[in-house]
DNA sequence: TATAGTAATGCAAACGTTTGCACACGCAAG
DNA sequence: CTTGCGTGTGCAAACGTTTGCATTACTATA
């Protein structure tokens, strides 16, 4: 139904090849015909079919992006930088979320492959690296926050967790809880490792009842608090897997009459926009979100262009102190 | 480079047509060959090229979705229901944001058209309907929250604004401010109309200095508050364009020592997840977000299948009372 | 004037599918 | 033994582009 290159060719009394060359700034064409054809094409509302073009050129200028969760602003913020880099290099984006569901992630991979995309970026992947390398069907893949994969960009979770914990210990806190994500992924295990190592370093005994599972979202934080407040000896500070969890935690604390930070300090992870604007504003570990997406996309473009020999990259997080933390009372 | 249907055909000693039929459950094929070919194809890791398929069948099973802003959870939440309906009908989604930028929205339209998508859904469009109908290049388009377009699904902004205002007036508030989005779109004008009509109805004079511009986000809310608190006579309640604005408003109020709701009540619009979990939790007008996306996608599928005669649809919002509003002190 | 070289254009093949049509085969009915 | 029909398969065209090669027309040089 749409207008094809032949329609334009016929109207311009030239061959389809000429139209194609005019539209693609091919050198072997007269400036005059080029201009004429371009104007005609525009006036006819001709838009080339990407499918046909991809088919014959055997490549596509679309990058697939799979994020774990649309509802977590962390992943959405990543999209901004990915889009910036991609657009600047004339690549399209095909974005999709797999809602933290492994099977959906795999289906997404299939659909990406059917589209013969130029490359793929996955943030928050649940698929283990083994599967990924094996499944690797000659299309480059870059992972975000999955540092064991050869082509990846991650924030240093271990360092981040240590910063948070050192800061809390420095404020005089001894009973510090950790609300996890609940899945045994790298991104989780490293935080836990940081949590433990700082406690050990300061000779603070590790109490496993202070380590409670969340779900990476607000609800998980709320549930965790109800467990923590039922403990015989309550924590004086809570370190959270991420900011969304921290918001749930603060909400539940305040609902149970526990003032933040007076009665309990809270530290998050990510530094989402809402961390600044929540009441009280949230002390957190900032992931360099923009740079994560930026570098990942650059890395993918390198891979697409040259099967380059780039390796995995680790970016440093940063402690942002705000109003949700205070010195421990004793 | 990838495996083609011919590779599979050769290995199976059949023609490409047979392979195609086996993979598509065509009736005219023996159960035996079908099974054999299917297994072989899978074991070879064959994945059909969507480009080639779309080209020859002249249709595609991908829906384009353009949302105004990834950073506003309202639009992101819409994606969930759109995806649910689309996936259930074996459609893919091509999602993109135009960051509230009109030129980016137009570029997005072009790119959608290059892909020869089956249909398009736009949420928060900045393009006026005139352009849209004219630009309509035989691909069906459904708009969300743009009720003047013939194929659209919207929440009733006017009714929502009236609910909010009636509620505030009912609590005894007389000086009620409105923080707008700052763009003269329908979605804005209707709220304003509701704001004014309720005040008029109750013989409350309309003070234009109480109507201040925001930007649809947190920052806009913050800036608006600094203008409102500098007024000789401060408002006792603030109705906000949306929840993100309301969060900015509450944050700024609390920062300036103004307690919510004791010193000032705040009402939002949307009912995002964060509205429940903010402190204090936010009284707001709930848009039926899930249903908006759901109905829009169903409508689009109808259009795709039958050039159906569906018209625009308006859904009712709902007042959700929480902790950010209180009776006026006098 | 003939010849080589260059610039602009057209021809036709190719990309990987789907699908209408023709064909071959086996079998039942006349 | 034909005829007809149904079932399974293959052939070839088509989808809308791009691009190597051939062709044409012109210009400049010898």
Image: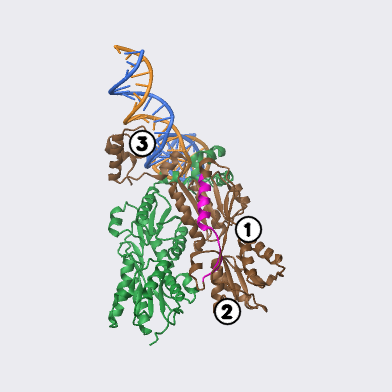
Chain colours: A green, B brown, C blue, D orange
Q: Residues within 10 Å of mark 1 (few under 14, many from 20)?
A: some
User: Which residue is rendered at x = 58% and y = 77% of the image?
Assistant: B262
Task: Pinpoint residue A1: horizontal percent, then vertical percent.
Answer: 52, 39
Q: Nearer the viewer, residue A207 or B153?
A: A207
**Could you tell me how far apart the alpha carbons at marks 1 and 2 are, in whole angstroms?**
32 Å
Find residue A218 and report its image quarter. bottom left
Task: Pinpoint residue B149: horizontal percent, then vertical percent.
Answer: 61, 51
Q: Which residue is mark 1?
A: B186
Task: Pinpoint residue D9: horizontal percent, then vertical percent.
Answer: 32, 31
- Magenta residues, start to end: B281-301
User: Which residue is rendered at x = 37% and y = 33% of the image?
Assistant: B27
Say yes or no: labels 1 and 2 on the same chain.
yes
**Front: mark 1 or 2:** 2
Task: Give residue B258's mark.
Answer: 2
**Could you tell me how far apart the alpha carbons at marks 2 and 3 are, in whole angstroms?**
70 Å
**Front: mark 1 or 3:** 1
Q: Which residue is mark 3?
A: B21
Residue B159 vs residue B38: left or right? Answer: right
Q: Which of the two labelled residues, at mark 1 and mark 2, occupies the earlier sequence position?
A: 1
Q: Main secondary structure of the magenta part?
A: helix
Q: Which of the two labelled residues, at mark 1 and mark 3, occupies the earlier sequence position?
A: 3
Q: Nearer the viewer, residue B68 or C1?
A: B68
Chain designation of label 3: B
Say yes or no: labels 2 and 3 on the same chain.
yes
Q: Residues within 10 Å of mark 3 (few under 14, many from 20)?
A: some
Chain designation of label 2: B
Query: Judging from the image, what secondary structure is the residue with disc 3 in?
Result: helix
Label 1–label 3 contact, CB within 8 A: no
Residue A192 vs residue B269: left or right? Answer: left
Chain designation of label 1: B
């Amino acid at each position: 139904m749409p207008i094809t290159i032949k329609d334009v060719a016929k109207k311009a009394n030239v061959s389809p090849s000429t139209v194609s060359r005019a539209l693609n700034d091919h050198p072997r064409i007269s400036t005059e015909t080029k201009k004429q054809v371009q104007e005609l094409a525009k006036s006819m509302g001709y838009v080339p079919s990407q499918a046909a073009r991809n088919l014959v050129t055997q490549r596509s200028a679309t990058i697939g992006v799979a994020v774990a969760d649309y509802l977590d602003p962390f992943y959405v913020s990543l999209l901004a930088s990915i889009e910036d880099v991609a657009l600047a290099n004339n690549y399209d984006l095909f974005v999709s979320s797999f809602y933290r569901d492994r099977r959906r992630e795999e289906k997404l991979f299939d659909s990406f492959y059917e589209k013969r995309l130029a490359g793929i970026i996955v943030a928050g992947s649940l698929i283990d690296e083994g599967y990924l390398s094996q499944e690797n069907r000659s299309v480059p893949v870059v992972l975000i926050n999955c540092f064991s994969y050869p082509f990846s960009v991650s924030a240093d979770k271990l360092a981040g967790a240590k910063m948070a914990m050192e800061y809390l210990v420095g404020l005089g806190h001894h009973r510090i809880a950790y609300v996890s994500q609940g899945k045994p992924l790298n991104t989780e295990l490293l935080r836990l490792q940081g949590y433990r190592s700082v406690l050990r370093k300061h000779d603070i005994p590790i109490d496993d009842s202070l380590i409670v599972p969340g779900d990476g979202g607000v609800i998980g934080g709320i549930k965790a608090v109800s467990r923590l407040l039922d403990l015989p000896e309550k924590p004086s500070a809570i370190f959270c897997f991420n900011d969304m969890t921290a918001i749930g935690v603060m909400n539940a604390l305040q609902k149970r009459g526990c003032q933040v930070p007076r009665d309990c300090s809270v530290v998050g992870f990510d530094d989402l926009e809402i961390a600044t604007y929540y009441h009280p504003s949230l002390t957190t570990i900032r992931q360099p979100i923009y740079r994560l997406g930026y570098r990942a996309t650059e890395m993918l473009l390198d891979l697409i262009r040259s099967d380059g020999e780039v390796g995995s990259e680790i970016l440093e997080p940063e402690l942002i102190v705000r109003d949700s933390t205070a010195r421990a009372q004793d």
